[in-house]
Image (cartoon, rainbow, N blue to C red):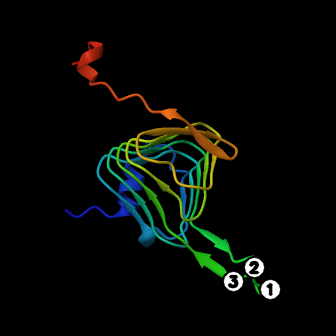
Amino acid sequence: MEVNAATRIMLAYSARKNSAQVQHPWLLSMAEHSAIAEEVLVYNLGPICIGEHSVVSQRTHLCAGTHDYHRLDLPLVRSTIVIGRGVWICADSFIGPSVTIGDNALVGAASVVMSDVAPGMFGAGNPARVIRARPRPTDLNDRGVS
């Protein structure tokens, strides 16, 4: 059975509460084992792609739309957001238009990301900046979990 983006979003939540909002479900692409947590706002006027094994935590805002403020008529600009594989975007963050979060990157809580975060880096703050390289994830078996 083909599982579309809307179905994957529903599977990412507890059965009690599904409070994420997706503006245009057909413009959201989620790979296997990725999740969008509760109260996430997906304002996807343009495509948003989320790679496998990535998590977008509670109350994050993914904003793939803006206005061209250089023009008097302020036309709508539809942009793309790309979230790579193995990414964790911590709670209450804002990911702006045309941003790419590289594979295995980490975005700290309440960050405002308006430019790309390179693969394997930890970015945080307002505006977000690279803090350091993200430590290599360890295997669960290294911690005594089987």
Which of the 4 quarters of the picture holds residue 77? bottom right
In the rendered image, the residue lying farthest to the right is: 72
Nearer-the-camera pick, 20 or 98: 98
Q: Residue at x 52, y 54 (%)?
A: 116
Question: Which residue reaches farthest top?
Answer: 144
Mark 1: few/some/many CA within 10 Å (<14, 14-19, 20+):
few
On the image, the x and y values in percent for residue 54 come to 39, 45
32 displayed left or right of 95:
left
- Mark pair 1, 3: CA separation: 8 Å
Q: Residue 64 in the image: x percent, y percent?
A: 56, 66
| Disc number placed over residue 75 in the picture, else none | 3
Asked whether the residues under the numbered discs 3 and 2 touch, taking CB atoms below 8 Å apart as contact, a structural biologist would say no
The numbered mark at residue 26 is: none
Q: Estimate the x, y position of residue 27 in percent, counting from the top left.
A: 44, 71
Which SS class for mark 2?
A: loop
Quarter occupied by the C terminus: top left
Task: Read off the residue under disc 2.
Answer: 70
State whether residue 25 is above or below residue 7. below
Query: Foreground residue, 18 or 132?
Result: 132
Q: Residues within 10 Å of mark 3 (few under 14, many from 20)?
A: few
Per the image, label 1 sits on a secondary structure element best described as loop
Give percent across and percent down for residue 33: 31, 46
Badge 1 vs badge 3, beta-carbon distance below 8 Å: no
The label on residue 72 is 1
Disc count in the image? 3
At label 1, the amino acid type is Leu
Say whether residue 34 is visible.
Answer: yes
Q: CA distance from mark 3 to mark 2?
A: 9 Å
Instruction: Please tell me which of labels 3 and 2 falls first in the chain.
Output: 2
Quadrant of residue 74 within the rendered picture? bottom right
